[in-house]
Image (cartoon, helix red, strand yellow):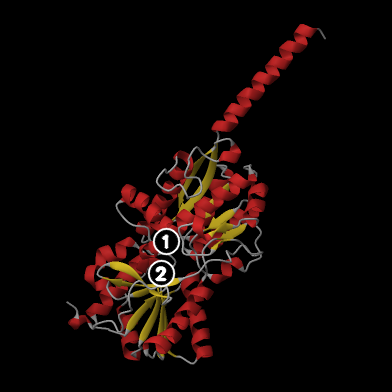
Amino acid sequence: MSTKIMFRRLMQAATAMAISVSAYAQQEVKIGVIYPLTGSAASSGAEMKSALELAADIINNGAKSVPSLPFSAGGGLPNLKGAKIKLVFADHQGNPQVGATETERLITQEKVVAVVGAYFSNVTATSSQVAERYKIPFVNPESSSASLTQRNFKWFFRTTAHDDLFVHNFFDFFKDLEAKKDIKVKKLAAFNENTLWGNETSKLEVKLAGERGYDLSKTIAYPAKTTQLTSEVQLLKAAAPQVVMQSSYLGDAIMAMKTYKELDFSPDMILANNAGFTDTEFIRTLGKDADYVITRDVWALDLAKKNPLIKQVNDLFFERNKINFTGNSSRTFTGLMTLADAINRAGSTEPEAIRKALTETDIPGNKIIMPWKGIKFDDKGQNMYGSGILVQIIDGKYNTIWPFDLATRDVVWPMPKWDQRK
């Protein structure tokens, strides 16, 4: 081979390599996201979609106002030569089978390298089964059914805490109420929707009530997507519990509150298990009638005093969407940031490399917007550092009231009767 021919071939190879590197530098990392974008939880889905879009925008384009937030410098993923995050959305409509089908489409047709979702625990269960089968990482930011991380899955990772911890929080709260506020709670009722999330929560509540000596006088599971709750609320009223522990998605939560008022049912407290009770639309729709409800949560704006990132990133979210983060949307934001961290550390879009990086995740609490110690997964894919708080709605705002050492205002107990409210 002549020197000229060899030189020409070397130049061609170098040019091809340069083109390849340039294309790599500009490539998009496609992440599938699956949420309820239509149906009864569409409002919740829209807020979580907005949170994902904010996270992707920060990673891709930066956020100079929050320099301590990972990826705030922008420019894409540094270890992938500036590759940008591209979100590919799918709507599961609150239907587990649709969730499974859409997840398969995201993986096989859209060629996503990972999936984030899916809010509804029963949809997360079916969707993550598909991802497991295809060996694609599935990051779950919000679903809290404890069983999701008890399936020995290799590709499933949950950043939020789960209902086993959250239900324990309820009973720890009752104990602290008696010890520190001299408020004694003994008679309870459980009122939950009947999908995976509600049913598992109810079982945990029954179990812990028995172990800790509480009288759980009534357990009611109502049909998901029901159109009325009159008969169920009449049964609750007849049981006369001090506290109703309730697990409901948005439409049901609003319907329940309206029915409580209509039937003049006034327990000492509604103690809600997040979901619909922390959606922006809950207060927007009910107005003053939403006040005094206590709900477990994982995020509150008033905790910014302890973690400045909370307000800094919330300001960005509010500027774009004219609403604050909620416990749902803040977790969704955190889930995508966690996945991006893993992809960046992997320096690769190969699913196995991403999965391995997720197992090695160790993000400190001062780098996330959640009031957690951080994010680190155990061998089941569960974040070991997730935790919960309780917030109470007063004057249309969520106020941290427990743990008492984090409280920004004192608990109002009992709830005022309907005819005593201003």
Q: Position of residue 60 (x, y in %)?
A: 47, 40
Under mark 2, the amino acid is: Asn
**Residue 274 disc label:** 2
Residue 36 can be seen, yes or no? no
Q: Quadrant of the N terminus?
A: top right
Q: Position of residue 414 (x, y in %)?
A: 30, 84
CA neighbours of label 2 inside 10 A, class few (<14), some (14 to 19), many (20+): many
Looking at the image, which residue is at 59% across and 59% down?
A: 157
Vertical arrangement, residue 331 with respect to residue 186, above or below: above
Q: Secondary structure at mark 1?
A: helix
* Drawn side of residue 182 relative to residue 109, left or right: left
Residue 399 can be seen, yes or no? yes
**What residue did someone put label 1 on?**
328
Give the mark nearest the N terminus, 1 or 2.
2
* Drawn side of residue 55 relative to residue 380, left or right: left
Under mark 1, the amino acid is: Asn
Looking at the image, which residue is at 54% across and 48% down?
A: 340
* Drawn side of residue 93 relative to residue 109, left or right: left
Instruction: Choose top left, top right, bottom left or bottom right for residue 263.
Output: bottom left
Q: Position of residue 141 (x, y in %)?
A: 50, 59
